[in-house]
Amino acid sequence: MTNALTKLMATRDWILADGATGTNLFNMGLQSGDAPEMWNEEHPDRIERLYREAVDAGSDLFLTNSFGGNAARLKLHGAQKRARELSRISAEIGREVADRYDRPVIVAGSVGPTGEIMAPMGALTHELAVEIFHEQAEGLKEGGADVLWLETISAQEEYKAAAEAFKLADMPWCGTMSFDTAGRTMMGLTSADMATMVEKLGNPPLAYGANCGVGASDLLRTVLGFVAQGSERPIIAKGNAGIPKYHDGHIHYDGTPDLMADYAVLARDAGATIIGGCCGTMPEHLSKMRAALEERPKGPRPTLDQITDAIGAFSSAADGTGDDVAPPRRTRRRRA
Ligand SMILES: [Zn+2]
């Protein structure tokens, strides 16, 4: 394996990813309801700044502005025919930024969910999902992405379709799911379910993990859930900056840069290799996260109590992986 991310992981104990794309773009004037991917063409200077500020704050890896850049999502904006092109431009801007630095910087081509429910529960067939993801993957590849980065996925069917599409594009990839429903994804997967599913894929990711969800504490509990499955595969932690709260009609994240610094160190000690933020994470958070990862020595794996003592309570009593919790949607998995 000679891709840039594998090379970087071979030389480092941790890699700092980036923060929020949406929160940063809203601060630059994006209106809710707009497709952020149109800015790749309309405001390339702002996208360049989004990427550059993350790298200047210490990120080793950043995600392209292409989260909703698949045909299913762009259809909502009448731009379904532009998935490949808009994704390519997002990666081209990223490539140009990354190549300016004299340290390795990884351009990760963001691929978000289709927004549709997959068969058998919904209408989106596996074949069509593969085609949608493949089209976007080719655009990101053409633009110069080092790796593809699937994120915020809820359904294992969708994760599997993306894995197949990325094989067609012949690109290395990483993939995270969002555990936003009492420790499970919206479709009911636990961290244990995901760790098991990933190892069974024909085209497994270089690294897997969790992004977004609820708060930073919950995300660390999910990381501990992956680790408990004994997987050797590198783990990704991309948690929100604190807990989302409504304030004056906006969603506001209350996590300070110091809290995210503690979160980053706890994520590393819990077993994550690629550590970043999600919603609410700004360059000032990333700077503190970088400094903390560099300055604080690696410690023992934190307990759940140590996590909540350091960065706040969980949003739910359990994460669905314990024997004391009856899973709501599927039969209880047998534990070894
Ligand atoms: Zn998020």
Image (cartoon, grey):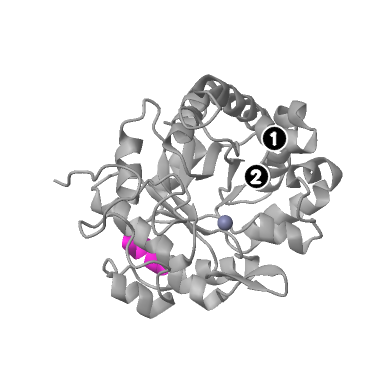
Q: Are marks 2 and 1 in contact (CB under 8 Å)?
A: yes
Say whether residue 293 is visible. no
Q: Which residue is drawn at 28% across and 44% down?
A: 232
Secondary structure of the residue carrying tag 2 is: loop
Picture quadrant of residue 316: bottom left
Report if the beta carbon of the residue with label 1 is closer than 8 angstroms to ligand 1.
no
Q: Which amino acid does label 1 sit on?
A: Ser
Query: Does residue 274 appear left or right of residue 306 in this picture?
Result: right
The verdict on residue 161 being magenta is: no
Magenta part mainly helix, strand or loop?
Answer: helix
Q: Residue at x 41, y 43 (%)?
A: 207
Look at mark 2 in the image and give the residue it sits on: 64
Residue 335 % position (x, y) = 17, 47
Q: Which of 208 and 217 is in front in this view?
A: 217
Lower sequence index among marks 2 and 1: 2
Q: Quadrant of the N terminus?
A: top left
Q: Nearer the viewer, residue 287 or 64?
A: 64
| Depicted 157 relative to depicted 334: above or below | above
Say whether residue 61 is visible. yes
Look at mark 1 in the image and give the residue it sits on: 87
In magenta, the rendered stretch is 265-270
Residue 303 % position (x, y) = 27, 70
Q: Which residue is drawn at 68% across and 45% down?
A: 65
- Quadrant position of ligand 1: bottom right
Q: Which amino acid does label 2 sit on?
A: Thr
